[in-house]
Image (cartoon, helix red, strand yellow):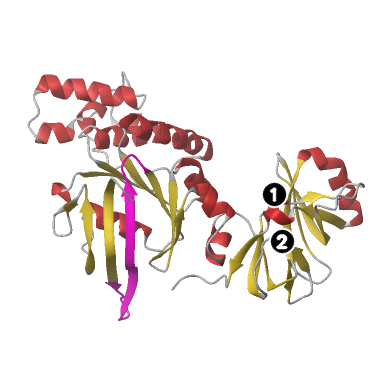
């Protein structure tokens, strides 16, 4: 990737276990981050995402491989000598210092002149929407305001790279969603690269230019949010990013025929062989009376219908036993009501929407 700000080559890291032996956190990671990019590291607990972030910041020493930032080898350089700042999950604000003192701390210890220091503190607080709160203590702020103080403190030193380790996880849902948009806007205004760690799929899809999905210390897929969601590289990515319907079987004559006997139509070409067909729940609709030859149909016996506010979720299985979940728009509520009575429904989907996953195994 041309003009990258970060490059890791074959990064490896293992940690000892209390009972003996080791666990591999990073298993030969190769990754590049572009300038001005918002990259999210996404995965379950223990997948290696935080270790990868700390390897970039210098808080974790690699067992092998290298870290380059802005073209310089930082592998042996300590954290305080790397052009990086980190925003942690717990914010780590000094409780006895005011907001202004917290934000200006890095400038104070670097010997910045008072006039310049005060100007930069005021500008940083205005950027994160905290103008006028310079004299408050952290305990006098809400969780969202404390998070913004941590951000202002991180950006005031004008780092080339900002690392964010699940900084929104302690916020309630509404504030978290608002801060997602604010963070993305702030990143664009600053014009620096953000590397963001989360286990929240929605958060990753909302905020990122690219998403790196990790499992077992390896990158399973790195691509745009849309590509990761619509065309996952393997079954792990398909299952971890959003809800999924996975039909394992063989590609035969334009359909994936499952072991239980269901046939999932697809327009994908290729020779016969084992594959997994992916259909996202929102790619289903309830069949109306009129038959559309371009749409494929799937009969489902209903186990449960859940009202989600924006629509309905139908949980069930085909008569052959394949589990299915379908997200139905509120516009089809009359058809949902009828299906709730009959406990049966005929779903339709576009065969062109079916994504095939060859093999479907997690990369090891």
Give the residue at x 28% y 66%: 10
Q: Please, what secondary structure does the residue beneath circle 1 have?
A: helix
Q: Main secondary structure of the magenta part?
A: strand
Q: Where is residue 151 in the image (x, y as percent from the top left)?
A: 31, 36
How would you rate the neighbour count of disc 1 (Cα within 10 Å): few for under 14, some for 14-19, many for 20 or more? some
Give the residue at x 79% y 74%: 261
Q: Which of 81 and 342 is in front in this view?
A: 81
Q: Which of 310 and 207 is in front in this view?
A: 207
The answer to whether residue 171 shows anywhere in this view is yes
Q: Position of residue 78 (x, y in %)?
A: 14, 54
Residues at marks 2 and 1 touching, judged by CB atoms closer than 8 Å: no
Q: What stretch is highlighted in magenta?
A: 15-37
Give the residue at x 75% y 70%: 253
Quarter-of-image position of residue 189: top left
Task: Tell whether 140 sits left or right of 313.
Answer: left
- Spatial CA span between label 2 and label 1: 17 Å
Q: Which residue is under mark 1? A: 282
Q: Which residue is under mark 2? A: 266
Q: Is residue 58 above or below residue 91?
A: below
Q: Where is residue 284 in the image (x, y as percent from the top left)?
A: 75, 51
Q: In this view, does 160 lie above or below 237?
A: above
Q: Which residue extends farthest bottom?
A: 20
Magenta span includes 32: yes
Quarter-of-image position of residue 135: top left
């Amino acid at each position: 990737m041309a003009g990258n700000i970060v490059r890791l080559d074959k990064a490896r890291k293992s940690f000892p276990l209390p009972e003996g032996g080791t666990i591999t956190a990073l298993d030969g990671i190769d990754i590049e981050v572009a300038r001005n990019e918002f990259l999210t590291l996404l995965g379950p607990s223990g997948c290696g995402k935080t270790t990868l972030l700390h390897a970039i910041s210098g808080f974790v020493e690699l067992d092998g491989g290298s870290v380059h930032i802005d073209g310089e080898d930082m592998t042996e350089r300590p954290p305080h000598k790397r052009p990086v700042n980190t925003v942690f999950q717990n914010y780590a604000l000094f409780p006895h210092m005011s907001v202004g003192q917290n934000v200006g701390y890095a400038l104070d210890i670097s010997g910045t002149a008072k006039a310049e220091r005060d100007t930069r503190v005021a500008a940083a607080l205005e950027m994160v929407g905290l103008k006028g709160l310079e004299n408050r203590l952290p305990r006098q702020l809400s969780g969202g305001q404390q998070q913004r103080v941590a951000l202002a403190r991180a950006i005031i030193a004008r780092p080339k790279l900002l690392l964010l380790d699940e900084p929104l996880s302690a916020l309630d849902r509404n504030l978290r969603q608002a801060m997602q948009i604010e963070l993305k806007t702030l990143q664009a205004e600053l014009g620096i690269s953000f590397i963001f760690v989360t286990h929240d799929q929605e958060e990753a899809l909302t905020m990122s230019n690219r998403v790196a999905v990790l499992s077992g210390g390896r990158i399973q897929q790195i691509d745009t949010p849309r590509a990761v969601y619509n065309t996952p590289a393997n079954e792990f990515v398909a299952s971890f990013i959003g809800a999924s319907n996975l039909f394992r079987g063989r590609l035969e004559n334009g359909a994936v025929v499952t072991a239980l006997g269901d046939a999932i139509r697809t327009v994908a070409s290729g020779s016969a062989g084992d594959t997994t067909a992916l259909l996202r729940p929102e790619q289903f609709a309830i069949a109306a009376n009129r038959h559309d030859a371009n749409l494929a149909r799937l009969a489902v016996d209903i186990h449960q219908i859940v009202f989600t506010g924006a629509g309905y979720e139908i949980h069930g299985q085909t008569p052959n036993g394949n589990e299915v979940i379908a997200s139905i728009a509120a516009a089809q509520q009359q058809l949902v009501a009828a299906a709730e009575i009959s406990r049966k429904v005929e779903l339709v989907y576009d065969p062109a929407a079916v994504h095939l996953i060859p093999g479907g195994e997690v990369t090891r």
